[in-house]
Image (spheres, grey):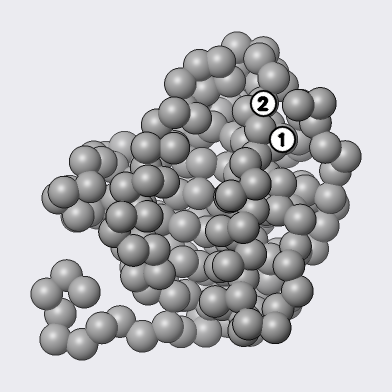
Amino acid sequence: MNGELFARARAEIAPGAVHVPDWLPYDRQRELLESCRAWSRPPAGLRSVKVPGGGTMSARQVCLGHHWLPYRYTDTAVDGDGAPVKPFPGWLKELANDALREAFGPGTAPEPYDVALINFYAEGARMGMHRDAEEESAAPVVSLSLGDTCVFRFGNTDDRGQPYRDVDLRSGDLFVFGGPARLAYHGVPRVKAHSGPPGLGLTGRLNLTLRVSGLPPTGH
């Protein structure tokens, strides 16, 4: 709650897009942070991502299950050290489906989540408006936030401009988008430095984006 008089309420940001504040309990945030630290170590660890125009994303990234680079998936970190991508653990698949049921109801059918894109935002990092469109599956995207609060801009499916809506995503927040919102443009125009839980031990923001690739499994 961060000292607020009233808890933040869950909200449907657009049809198919749901924000659930404070979904991850603090202990689970700590556990997830330690997992992210382990995944970020080489081989196939945290790296900077170059975009086709020649620039470099300000948020750094590590992948699980399949390795993402603009704008396709591979089995190895071809834009990093070339090592095989780290496996996507079964418990993370369970967490993604728990999130799906939290967002859309207990009767929601499970999905075969198999990809995680983990983005680290140091102070000053941001993410331009984009769509998650490289997957062969239309399953919802599950987003989990750790550390500093960000301004998350959730837009429309036509272009990067308005209409869009800005939402503060804090540590422990869940955001799920699927159905008519699955291919909506979204981005992070700003991260609020030093706004995360003091005891978490994270300077910056981590975002875990869990997806269903629809691709054959990698050879783990």
Picture residue at 30% right of the left edge, 82% below the top: 8
Picture residue at 46% right of the left edge, 84% below the top: 11
Query: Residue 178: which quarter of the image?
Result: bottom right
Query: What whole-number distance in Å separates the C-alpha atoms at marks 1 and 2?
Result: 6 Å
Residue 99 is situated, as x and y percent measured from the top left of the image, at 56, 68
- Label 2 neighbourhood size at 10 Å, few (<14), some (14-19), many (20+)? many
Answer yes or no: is residue 12 visible: yes
Secondary element under disc 2, as helix, strand or loop, is loop
| Badge number at residue 85 | 2
Residue flagged by tag 1: what amino acid is it?
His
Q: Label 1: which residue?
A: 66
In the picture as drawn, the residue positioned furthest to the top comes out as 81
Residue 137 is situated, as x and y percent measured from the top left of the image, at 82, 57
| Badge number at residue 179 | none
Q: Are marks 1 and 2 in contact (CB under 8 Å)?
A: yes
Foreground residue among 185 and 95: 95
